[in-house]
Amino acid sequence: MDFLDPIDATNFDPETDPGIDFYRHVNGGWLASNPVPAEHPAWGAAFEVHVRNEAILHDLLVDAAATPGPRGTPRQMVGDYFAAGMDTEKIEATGISPLDDYLHKITAMESQQDVGAVLVELRKVGVPAFHSVGIEPDFEDSNRYLVYLAQGGLGLPERDYYLRDDDRSKALVAAYVDHVAAQLHNLGEGGRGEAEEIVELETRLAAVSMPAEEHRDLSKVLNRHDMGSLDELMPRFGLTAHLRELGVTSPSVSVDNTAFFETLDGLLADTPIETSRSYLRWHLVRRFAPALPHTFEEEAFDFYNRKLGGQQEPRERWTRVLAAATSDIGELVSRLYVDTAFSPEAKERCERMVDHLIGAMARSVEALDWMTEATMQAALEKVGTFTHKIGYPEDWRDYSGVAVDRTSFAANRIRAAAFEFDRKMSRLDDPVDKGEWELPAHVVNAYYNPLHNEVVFPAGILQPPFFHAAADDAVNYGGIGAVIGHEITHGFDDNGSRFDEVGRRRNWWTEEDRAEFEKRAQVLVEQYSDYEVFDDLKVNGRLTLGENLADLGGLAIAYDAFVSTLDGSTPVVGGFSPEQRFFVAFATIWRMNYTDEYLRMITNVDVHSPNPFRANGPVSNFPPFAEAFGVADGSPMRRPADRLVDIW
Ligand SMILES: [Zn+2]
């Protein structure tokens, strides 16, 4: 057979029965021989691809820095950005001077009346203090943009970090206070007393913030308000005028959590101006610490990556500069990447797979026995208008408004943030740009956008072990096919199913179908809520519901798409039938070793379940898996018929 077989027997754990723990059966050997490197918080398939993509980009960045070419070209911008980020001598010499303007404005605030104006300046460079302001397509008319106001202003990942009172959580908050104090001290602007006041203020914001599982429920967080009525939420602060100052011209905005803004108004009025100054200094330095001298960067690493994330050592500097470039001028970096790492043949094969997967989704909807005709027709209409983007954008983003030079890494980052804010704000009245990508093409990720009813797969994830250009369909459908299916199914998860075929929030379900969907989804909530991560921590089945639904649906439609490609010759390769190879590839993409700290953090905040459950949860609900591996009734990998979750 003319392909490279990516399935490697040494990655398996033959001692573990596939019917007991399929994830470990397929990955046990790999897990044992691939511990988490000290400079990563976890290590698995997504990290392997990420590091491989970085290595490709490293050479391209070094090259661009050596010969940047004419001013204003992508090569000059990437080259100078990289050179400035690598020039640690200059970064030390420049100190915090790139922040000076902002620090002076903060210091000059005399009363709470002055906070709004300074907040405008900080927001324009992406400092997320007090609350956040985003600009995305309008949930009621996806051809237009809308401003989304959201709760925010916290330096810890989620509200519960402030509010839990077990010893571990209290120790983490104490470490956070130390960290805030250390950064204020590094700025020469205070210490422990100020840090305690900041954390107390954030704790009060946390108390009125929605929990993560509630905040991902779009039916709760999408609420349109007239601009004029916003002053009722924050009468003393003057929220309407604040937004006008930022450049918001539209008649209405969306507000996720009105209780948060009402409380914030009182908090701002009651907080001493000294505390507001400290708070804004802290969020300014938090935002730009990775671009400042070593003491700032090391302090931020120690708290956020080491203590909170479980990563023992920093990555090499060039990888950190690359990560900054990815967030600041991402598509310029992507342009270098795709020329080298993504062939037209790979793009064509992936496009074919996406078409097959969309076809499988349509067949799956048509075959549903629990859905009434009316809802089914609407669902089919939605599948019929699905669009996809594969590899990289047709038109690259224009960054020509960003001045990038070698004078200061932090100044480059500030200008890039200002450019991004301005880019989004200035097109608020324009029609939505449907060709735009939310992720740079070299990142290892994919997404479904309900407002465009589209799935997007950057070239960065269309790589082994997700996608092997030289491997058989079984491996590719079990790998990237399941990821594609996952993204497609997001159009029909607990959130996606509330948007219609043109990306409007609209209810196209009958009441009885919605009730049946929720009943079935509830079984999945219970299944995942039983999964134990640590003795004292289980998976949050509600928080992860949308992703678990997509994992299960994605597996089912990828399998159907794969089976439809089988021509009956069913060769056995490497001792596995094509069906077995499909499931082995599926379990392989989830292989992951975690540090305890990181695993604990993502279990608290991530909408995805930890990886072992992303493999075992779906297969245990999927009868073709039990059939392929001869899994007996009553085995952990074969859920009892009355608890089987079957939606798509
Ligand atoms: Zn997802």
Image (cartoon, rainbow, N blue to C red):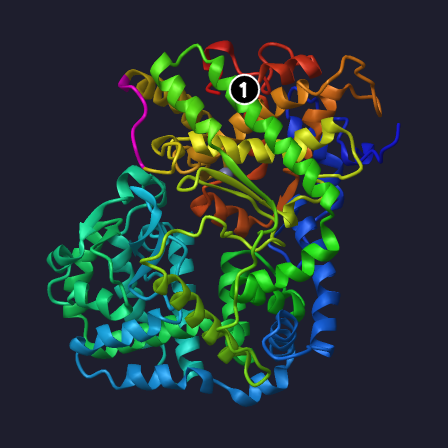
Q: Which residues are magenta?
A: 505-511
Please identify the quarter of the rendering in which residue 87 is found: bottom right
> Residue at 45% of width from left, 40% of height from top?
536
Q: Look at the picture and state if 404 lies above or below 524.
A: below
| 385 horizontally vs 240: left or right | right
Q: Pick whichever, 428 or 194, lies toward us.
A: 428
Label 1 crowding class (10 Å Cα cut-off): few <14, some 14-19, many 20+?
many
Tell me which secondary structure the magenta stretch mostly adopts: loop
List the single residue furthest toward the right: 1
Q: Position of residue 535 (x, y in %)?
A: 49, 38
Would you say residue 510 sits in the magenta stretch? yes
- Kindly identify the residue that appears in the image at 20 percent across and 55 percent down: 251
Q: Quadrant of residue 120?
A: bottom left
Q: Is residue 323 visible?
A: no
Q: Nearer the viewer, residue 401 or 55?
A: 401
Kindly identify the residue that appears in the image at 31 percent across and 76 percent down: 278
Mark 1 residue type: Asn
In the picture shown, does residue 576 fall above or below 408?
above
Whole-percent x and y of residue 182? 43, 76
Q: Is residue 184 left or right of residue 200?
A: right
Pick the front one: 480 or 273: 480
Q: In x, y percent, where is residue 562? A: 67, 23
Q: Which residue corresponds to mark 1? A: 621
Q: Secondary structure at mark 1?
A: loop
For residue 364, above or below residue 332: above
The answer to if 334 sits in the magenta stretch is no
Q: Residue at x 48, y 73 (%)?
A: 401
Residue 629 percent location from the top left of the image = 70, 16
Q: Is residue 212 visible?
A: yes
